[in-house]
Amino acid sequence: MNQIIKTLVADDEKYSREELKYLLGTHPAIQVSGEAATGREALAKIITDELDLLLLDIDMPEMSGIELAATLKKMKNPPLIIFTTAYSEYAVEAFKVQAVDYLLKPVDETELAEAIAHVSELLDFKREPARGKLAVGGEESITYLNPAEVLFVSRENNTTAVVSSKGIFSSRKTLKELESRLLSHSFFRVHKSYLVNTEVITEMTPWFNGAFQLTLEGTDVQIPVSRNYVKSLRDHIEL
């Protein structure tokens, strides 16, 4: 699918907005629907328009980029976010609010193209109805799993394991690739090495240094939740 990606550029510096719009102009799928100079102006435009993507500076007046992203997470269908900033130290906070990417200024054309390609893939899965089965297994045979049968996915030593109610299977795909494919189902990244089916979570208990552990139906394995993901996970699954 190559649908139009309606995009808002939010940066308090006019030169930065113009530079981003110029770079975005080389991508046919991108439609720059507007721009904003403050966090509150960006929020107002997002509430009014149905946007797919937000290129967002972090150091913004009235409402910072991080504060705006945290507010957008509460919306039913928020735009995907690519942060653009001159400060590398905000990266952890950016991914806490589930940014798709984090680009340092001056924005590199290749890095921007890679980020847009990722956004396009995520939007394709988001727009398509949830269907299909997950192919797992080795060279001798392929097993097809319904996503609802998968309990969690882990990645260790360049090996991806898919743990399901039918058993444990290997996958040649990375965790990032599986996260994209399972976006339209009830899966959530809780750790750099774990992707979890939120429908089978039964309990979350404190572990150490702000981290937690998850108990899941159908397995005795305790799944770690990095402290960077705790708040976003609770926002995602709790009423």
Image (cartoon, rainbow, N blue to C red):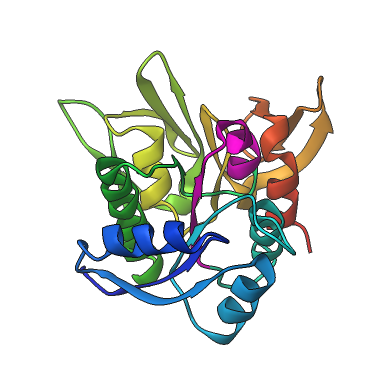
Task: In this rendered view, identify the residue nearer to me: 160 or 225.
Answer: 225
Seen as rendered, the residue at the extreme front is 15
Residue 139: which quarter of the image?
top left
Tell me the residue at 68%/35% (across/down): 228
Does the stretch in magenta take in 90? yes
Percent position of residue 10, x then y: 52, 64
Tell me the residue at 74%/44% (across/down): 202
Does the stretch in magenta take in 70? no
Percent position of residue 76, x then y: 62, 73
Asked if one can make out residue 225 in the rendered structure from this viewpoint, the answer is: yes
Seen as rendered, the residue at the extreme top is 157
Q: In this view, does 17 lie above or below 162?
A: below
Percent position of residue 125, x then y: 35, 62
Asked if one can make out residue 131 in the rendered structure from this viewpoint, the answer is: no
Task: In this rendered view, identify the residue nearer to me: 24 or 137.
Answer: 24
Which residues are drawn in magenta?
Answer: 79-95
